Each structure stands twice: as C-alpha cells, then as structure tokens.
Image (cartoon, rainbow, N blue to C red):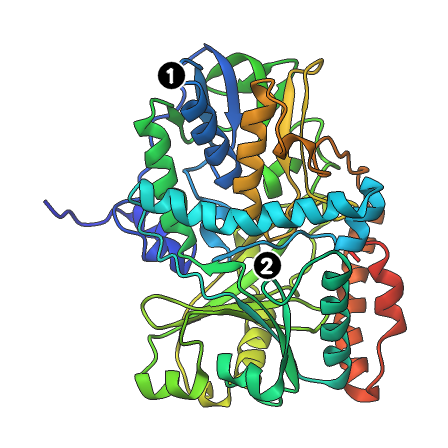
Amino acid sequence: MNHAPTDADTSRRALSFWHDTVPGGLDPRPGLPGDQTADIAIVGAGYTGLWTAYYLKRADPALRIVVLEAEFAGFGASGRNGGWCSAIFPSSLTKVAKVAGSPAAATALQRALNATVDEVGRIAAAEGIDCHYAKGGTVVLARTPVQLERAHEEVEEGRAFGFGEEDLRLLSADEATQHAHAADVLGATFTPHCAAIHPARLARGLAAAVERLGVPIFERTLVTEIRDGVVRTPHGTVRAEIVVRATEGYTATLRGFKRAIAPVYSLMLATEPLSDETWTAIGLTDRQTFADHRHLIIYGQRTADGRLAFGGRGAPYHFGSSIKPEYDRELRVHAELRSVLVELFPVLDDVKITHTWGGALGVPRDWFASVGVDRAAKLAWAGGYVGDGVGASNLAGRTLADLLRGERTELTELPWVGHRSPRWEPEPARWLGANLGLRVMSAADAEEARTGRPSRRAAIFGRFIGH
C-alpha cells in the first residue's frame, strides 16, 4: 500500500537527485538497542562498510558482524557521488610505483581495480540490485593543446606500465566526438573500465543484501569514539575483536582522528530529462561517463532516465574539517558548474536544472588510498579515495575480508595494503593549504587557456597530491 511521504522522508530525499529517485522509503533502521559484543564491528554504512560486511559474511557465515551508521545506509558520499564505478586510483601509476618500490606492484593494483568494475556489476546482478549499471567506459576530453599534451602523457604512462589499447587509448578529435559531441574537442583518452550507476540504488540494495546475510545495520547511531576494540555511541557500547573504520569523509568527526582524513566538498547538479533530439546533439549513447583534462576536476554521466548529472570540485574546504548541511549547496559553485556544462554542450543553454546537491569526500594528506589492519590496536580501515570510491571501495571490502580472516591472497599483497598516510597539518595550516590548492588549480586552468602552456604552479602543487 502506498503511503504519503513524511516530512523527514522528504528531507532525506532532498539530499541529492539520487536519493530523490531511489525506490522505497528512506526511513532509518532502528538504532543500537544497547551494549553488544561482536567479532567485527563496522563503523559506517557506506560502500566501504557494506562491501566489507558482505564479503566477510559470505566467506564466513559464523562471524558475528554489526554495522553502525550515524544516519542511514548511503547517506554520505556513497549516495551522492557522480555514479562512476571506475578503476581510478587517486595517485598516479608513477607515484604508486615509487611508494611501493616496484612498477609491477603499481600495475597489479591497477589491474585489480580494472577487474573490480566487472565485480560490482556481477554482484549487483546476483543480488538483484537494479543500480542502472551500464559499462560504457570513460571518455576524458582534451579541449586545449595543453590538455591534449596531458592526454598523450597519460597514455604514455599507461604503456610504460604494461597497459595496451584495450585498457587506455588516445582518441583523435573525430573519434572523441563519436563518444561526446562537446565543443572545441581536440582529442581524448578512453578507457572501457568504468560503468555508470545510480549510486543510491547501489548503496540501498547492498544494505539490503547485507541484512539478508544476517548482518544487523544499526542506523541513527552516532559513533563518537573507537579505541582498543570498543565502539562508543550514545545508545550503548559495542566490544569487538576488530573495529573497521569505514567513515571516509566523516572520519574527522571521530575522537582522535581529526587530522586523518580531510573532508572536501564536491558539488553536483542534474538536468531535467532531455529530449531524444538533444541527446542526438550530445552523444553518450552508451552512457559513457565523461570529463576533460583540466586541473579542477569535472565529471558527468547520462542517467538511465535521460538526464545529465554533472559535478565538479570548487567548493572550499571548511575550517576545522567542518561538515554541515548548508555546505551541500554553494550558489557560486553550482552556477559555475552550469556554465561549464553549457560551455561543453551549448545545446543545453536553456535546459532546466532540477536538482543541486553536494557532499563531503575523504582526502588523505598524500592522496593515497589505503586499506589495512592493526591487530594490536584492534582496528582496521579503508578509504581515502578522493572521490573515486565506488569501485575502489569494493576492492577494499574484498581485501579487508581476506585480511581480517588471516588469508594471504593476491589482494592482500597489493601496494595500498598497510599504507599509512601522514596526518594533515593542524589548523589554520590545514585550511590555508587546502584552499590554496583549490585556488592554484583553478587559476592554472585559466592560465593555460590564456597562454597555451602548462602551468608551472600546477606542476609544483601536483607534487603534493596524487601526481
């Protein structure tokens, strides 16, 4: 029987286009009923926590696992992102090889991420999760000579690490426009290793799959502290052999983790459903995800219901790693995103924007995602995806399932396992540095468009991030 949505459900649906269009209600599950014990407690019911619970329980049904979530499953970045199930790692192959001390290790990590795109589709099909999965690949456009130079460099780097045209290839202008009919295209890179998805459908469906396996998810249960296998909440305490910190952009809200991960906002918009005529002018017939080779990241996809969902960086980092609902929408940034979208596809000049939203993603100090277990501290973790966690979180969940069961596998040997990122600087240095970086990269794009030469400032700053 249908029922009228409550004010609270309406508020939850207003979080993003994805939440607004997910089937079923968004009423939270019951909270933690009191003190409990478990083999493994997972803090966070986003992709990382849910994938970890899923693979652990599938591998060992006898494990006592509980998942604790401050809001509801898929509330954070897992329900609000751009819907790219990609094989992207936040650090370049060259940097991964340097950190790992081995080019082969970097290649192994990338191949594992490539395979993960198919693994997500496999599990979605097996569990009956209709997340609008469409593996159309990613086209990253080059729209200036400097961007085209970066496209060449990316392909050359891929070749140096053993990746052929079946993984990444350079496109001519004509080939690029067969994917996306954007303005001023000089070329592009294309990889098949990405699927467009509806992220909230995946998060909600995955939570239901975890529950079917017998894992309880306690929602509206704010975790305030994790220490020595003890998870403290206002509703009670959970004691476990291992606690998995799967909090990504919300990590700074935990006592003792203020400088572990910086929450940085990414903002998005969605158009009204577009006509067939408009789509003929745009392309993206296989629901390819798309971006371009500018410094300040943009990203988009064609949704299953015929909209363009488009986002990018540009929102400021907020002092003290603050996260507030009012940060989800920035009029200036959303106006700029619309302007960039129309610049790419002029046919959208008069299109109606039906949804604007945003959310915090997690950035480690060295832009190097990691997964690991510290048995002495009774703590495991995964995260630091810098906005590319839809695919990486699945690989993290499978890896944690092996690590926590004491298994030595190909996954547990990957170079992000056990990596420890340095802590972020204390305030105000953290605020100054993060926002300086934002301004540098934004100015670099304008400088390159004006001069036709690569920005030296961007190259210098790139050493401090994933380049």
Residue at 54 percent of width and 59 percent of height:
193
127 up-or-down from 276: above or below: above
Residue at 85 percent of width and 48 percent of height:
429
Q: Position of residue 419 (x, y in %)?
A: 75, 34
Q: Position of residue 280 (x, y in %)?
A: 38, 86
410 up-or-down from 293: above or below: above
Residue kind at label 2, given as amino acid type: Ser
Figure quadrant of residue 251: top right
Q: Position of residue 239 (x, y in %)?
A: 54, 11
Dot 1 alpha-carbon crowd within 10 angstroms: few under 14, some 14 to 19, many 20 or more: few
458 up-or-down from 220: above or below: below
Say whether residue 461 is visible: yes
Residue at 89 percent of width and 63 percent of height:
460
Say whether residue 77 is visible: no
Image quarter (top left, top right, bottom left or bottom right) of the C terminus: bottom right
Q: Earlier in the sequence, mark 2 or mark 1?
A: 1
Residue kind at label 1, given as amino acid type: Pro
Residue with the mark numbered 2: 266
Residue at 34 percent of width and 72 percent of height:
306
Left or right: residue 174 versus residue 440 is: left
Question: Element under label 2?
Answer: strand
Residue with the mark numbered 1: 33
Q: Any mark on residue 414, and which?
A: none
| Front residue of 127 and 83 | 127
Mark 2 and mark 1: span between their CA atoms? Answer: 35 Å
